[in-house]
């Protein structure tokens, strides 16, 4: 938890950086590559791997069953619609599917966080959910494939312990895929093809609906990506590339699950305001609301700030809304104080950045801390389960930011004044910076 109480949930940006740097590693499967020997897997961690077709008789007759499930795991003779007709089929199948299985054991999972959190490296709204149980002590919370398909990518987080913290992508249809981060203790079937050290490997491992793919301890990142969907609330310069795993995020995660799993997932959600899945795309062309990037820092991809490593978030800035209580304006800033970033509410919760344009001129936002209050009036600790959460702004001003939209509506001038009040920040100084999108 940082100095103002935010949960130090998983630091995800490294994954985004790796994806951006690799030119879209999740799209790198090559059908022409044959299965290497066990030795070559260890010696060539970056090479694509395609599993040989699995004989039908080798499929387990009973798959691991999640605690929360609608029906008994299907036998090979009664394949669910979300799984290819045969594991011998190596191409994607269809575009539409609904799941009968939760991505995790919901009996051991306390909280499902909505998308849109801004904290630490995540200066712009986070594009994935979190399944959490911070009181858990072991890697014993089951992670499942919600539908059948193929594991197509396995990544090992930089610096992660051997056997822990893998990224997994499961292709369910030709457009829909599940994305997990921080899956540990992979089953032998999957672990045999995982990279032994940090990096990514393209594979094609068949999995069935409800099949166990690993475990998590306290926190698991999960998202559904649908290439048939494009979120429109991202505006970036033509010479920048928006991160594809933001633009194709499904709008309503819960709508991809059948009952009763859908209702059980919603029960775990701490957001009760529509859209319950949360929201990440706030950009409106010509308006202040949304994400901005320090001029010359390559948008979401970020500039290289260390040898061979990009710290993309160092150039990010966001004028958005709280991920649980969307009525609260949030300004997310890099370089304001200690830590990777700071998130503040706005005194008086006004003016709404969705209404700020070039015609608005110079805008002064007085920054305040804010907290969450549960429906019973108690302060939320940000890790336990709660419903009906609302934000409340504090009175003490922590500082001021000045912002003004420039001609064309795709650039802003921005400056921070920590510890100052609005009356003490008369105008821009030489420290002001230009952001664009």
Image: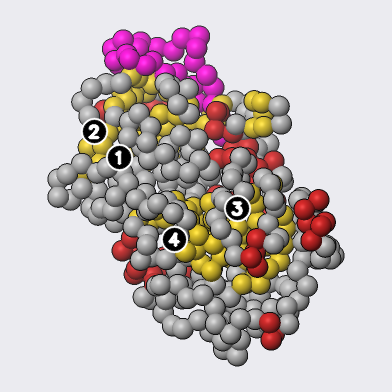
Q: Which residue is mark 3?
A: 163
Say which element carries label 2.
strand
Say which element carries label 3.
loop
Viewer-proximal residue among 351 and 418: 418
Image quadrant holding the C terminus, namely top right
Along the polypeptide, which appears first: circle 1 or circle 2?
Answer: 1
Which label lies toward us, 2 or 3? 3
Q: Which residue is mark 2?
A: 393
Viewer-proximal residue among 367 and 172: 172
x%, y% of residue 396? 23, 22
Mark 1 neighbour class, 10 Å CA radius: few under 14, some 14 to 19, many 20 or more: many
Say which element carries label 4.
strand
x%, y% of residue 95? 60, 72
Q: Is residue 420 magenta?
A: yes
Left or right for 297, reference 287:
right
Which label lies toward us, 1 or 2? 2
How far apart are the alpha carbons under marks 2 and 4?
A: 36 Å
Q: Quadrant of residue 253?
A: bottom left
Which label lies toward us, 2 or 4? 4
Along the polypeptide, which appears first: circle 1 or circle 4?
Answer: 4
Along the polypeptide, which appears first: circle 1 or circle 3?
Answer: 3
Left or right for 357, reference 83:
left
Mark 2 neighbour class, 10 Å CA radius: few under 14, some 14 to 19, many 20 or more: some
**Residue 170 visible, this orientation:** yes
How far apart are the alpha carbons under marks 1 and 3?
A: 40 Å
**Residue at horizontal 71%, vertical 66%?**
204
Residue 328: assigned label = 1
Q: Decide: marks 1, 3 in contact (CB < 8 A)?
A: no
Residue 141: assigned label = 4
Magenta-highlighted residues: 412-437
**Residue at horizontal 51%, vertical 75%?**
64
Q: Decide: marks 1, 2 in contact (CB < 8 A)?
A: yes
């Amino acid at each position: 938890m940082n100095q103002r109480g935010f949960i130090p949930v998983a630091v995800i940006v490294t994954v985004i950086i790796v994806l951006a740097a690799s030119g879209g590693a999740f799209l790198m499967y090559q059908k022409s590559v044959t299965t290497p020997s066990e030795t070559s897997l260890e010696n060539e961690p970056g090479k694509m791997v395609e599993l040989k077709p699995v004989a039908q008789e080798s499929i387990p007759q009973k798959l691991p069953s999640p605690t929360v499930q609608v029906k008994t795991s299907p036998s090979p003779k009664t394949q669910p619609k979300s799984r290819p007709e045969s594991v011998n089929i190596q191409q994607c199948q269809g575009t539409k599917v609904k799941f009968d299985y939760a991505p995790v054991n919901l009996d051991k999972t306390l909280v499902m966080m909505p998308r849109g959190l801004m904290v630490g490296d995540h200066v712009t709204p986070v594009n994935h959910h979190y399944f959490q149980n911070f009181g858990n002590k072991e890697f014993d919370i089951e992670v499942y494939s919600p539908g059948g398909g193929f594991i197509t990518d396995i990544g090992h987080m930089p610096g992660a312990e051997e056997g822990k913290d893998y990224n997994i992508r499961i292709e369910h249809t030709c457009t829909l895929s599940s994305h997990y981060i921080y899956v540990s203790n992979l089953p032998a079937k999957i672990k045999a093809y995982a990279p032994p050290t940090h990096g990514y490997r393209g594979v094609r491992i068949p999995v069935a609906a409800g099949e166990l793919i690993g475990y998590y301890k306290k926190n698991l990142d999960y998202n559904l990506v649908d290439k048939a969907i494009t979120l429109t609330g991202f505006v970036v310069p033509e010479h920048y590339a928006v991160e594809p795993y933001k633009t194709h995020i499904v709008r309503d995660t819960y709508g991809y699950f059948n009952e009763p799993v859908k209702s059980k997932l919603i029960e775990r959600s701490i957001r009760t305001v529509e859209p319950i899945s949360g929201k990440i795309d706030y950009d409106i062309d010509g308006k202040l609301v949304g994400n901005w990037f320090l001029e010359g820092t390559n948008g979401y991809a970020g500039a290289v700030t260390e040898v061979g490593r990009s710290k993309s978030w160092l150039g990010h800035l966001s004028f958005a809304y709280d991920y649980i209580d969307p009525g609260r304006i949030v300004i997310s800033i890099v370089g304001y104080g200690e830590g990777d970033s700071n998130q503040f509410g706005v005194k008086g919760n006004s003016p709404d950045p969705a209404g700020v344009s070039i015609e608005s001129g110079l805008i002064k936002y007085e920054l305040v801390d804010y907290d969450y209050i549960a429906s019973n009036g108690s302060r939320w600790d940000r890790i336990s389960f709660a419903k009906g959460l609302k934000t409340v702004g504090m009175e003490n001003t922590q500082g001021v930011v000045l912002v003004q939209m420039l001609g064309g509506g795709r650039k802003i001038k921005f400056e921070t004044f920590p510890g100052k009040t609005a009356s003490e920040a008369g105008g821009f100084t030489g420290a002001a910076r230009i952001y664009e999108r």
